[in-house]
Every structure is written in C-alpha cells, then in structure tokens.
Amino acid sequence: MAKIQTINATEFKAKCLEILDRLSAREVDQIVVTKRGKPVAVLTPPPSEDAAIRSIHGFMRGSVAVPPDFDLTEPVSAEAFIADSGDLHG
C-alpha cells in the first residue's frame, strides 16, 4: 500500500530537508504539496538502482516470441550478402 502524505507549502518550506530525508529512506512513497488546498507538486523518491537498470536494460524482455522450431543460428538466405564483397551499399 502506497504511503502518501499531503503537506501544505508553508510546512514543506519549513521542513524541506526532513521531508527529502524521509523520501530517501523510503518512509513515504509520495509527498503531495498543496497551496491553498490545491496540489501544486508531487514528490517521489527516485527509482532504486536495480529498478533504473531494469527499465533501461531488458525493457523489451518478453516482447518477442520465437517459435520453438525456429533455429536462430541457421542462415536466413542462401544468397551472399552485398557486404560479403566489402560493398556496404548496393
């Protein structure tokens, strides 16, 4: 369950460093800062290093399906590629 705290801008200004420390320690998941009762900002801690890496590396994991009888090591064409002769553009 997400731990969300709402705080007004005046209190946020007075306790900013304490609030950032609580976010960093993951004591709260989200801080909503309000001004005159209306939300003006939402603070969340940055993703963990593991989560950040997972979002970059392997973000397409599971998006490709290879049929079980398909051999990924088998050549796809019997014809030679143009690049085989050193010519990169035909």
Image: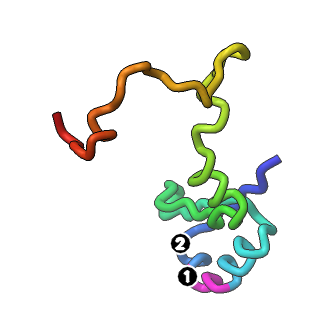
As drawn, the label of residue 48 is none
Mark 1 secondary-structure assignment: helix
Residue 76, position as x, y percentages in the image:
48, 22
Q: Which residue is mark 1?
A: 13
x%, y% of residue 67?
67, 15
Three-letter code for the amino acid on which mark 1 is drawn: Lys
Is any atom of residue 16 visible in this view? Answer: yes
Residue bearing mark 2: 9
Q: Is residue 16 magenta?
A: yes
Task: Tell me which residue sits at (59%, 44%) in the image.
Answer: 59
Q: Nearest the camera: 47 or 28?
A: 47
Looking at the rendered image, the quarter that the C terminus falls into is top left
- Residue drawn at (65%, 17%) of the image: 70
Q: Nearer the viewer, residue 69 or 47?
A: 69
- Across and down, in percent, residue 20 comes to 65, 78
Q: Is residue 6 visible?
A: no
Give residue 52's quadrant in the image. bottom right
Quarter assignment of residue 50: bottom right
Disc 1, disc 2: CB below 8 Å?
yes
- Local crowd size for mark 1, using a 10 Å CA cut-off: few (<14), some (14–19), many (≥20): few
Residue 79 versus residue 10 in the image, above or below? above
Tell me where the magenta segment starts and ends, as one range: 13-17
Residue at (49, 64) in percent of width and height: 35
Question: What separation in Å lies between label 1 and label 2 (alpha carbons)?
Answer: 6 Å
State the residue in front, 81 or 11.
81
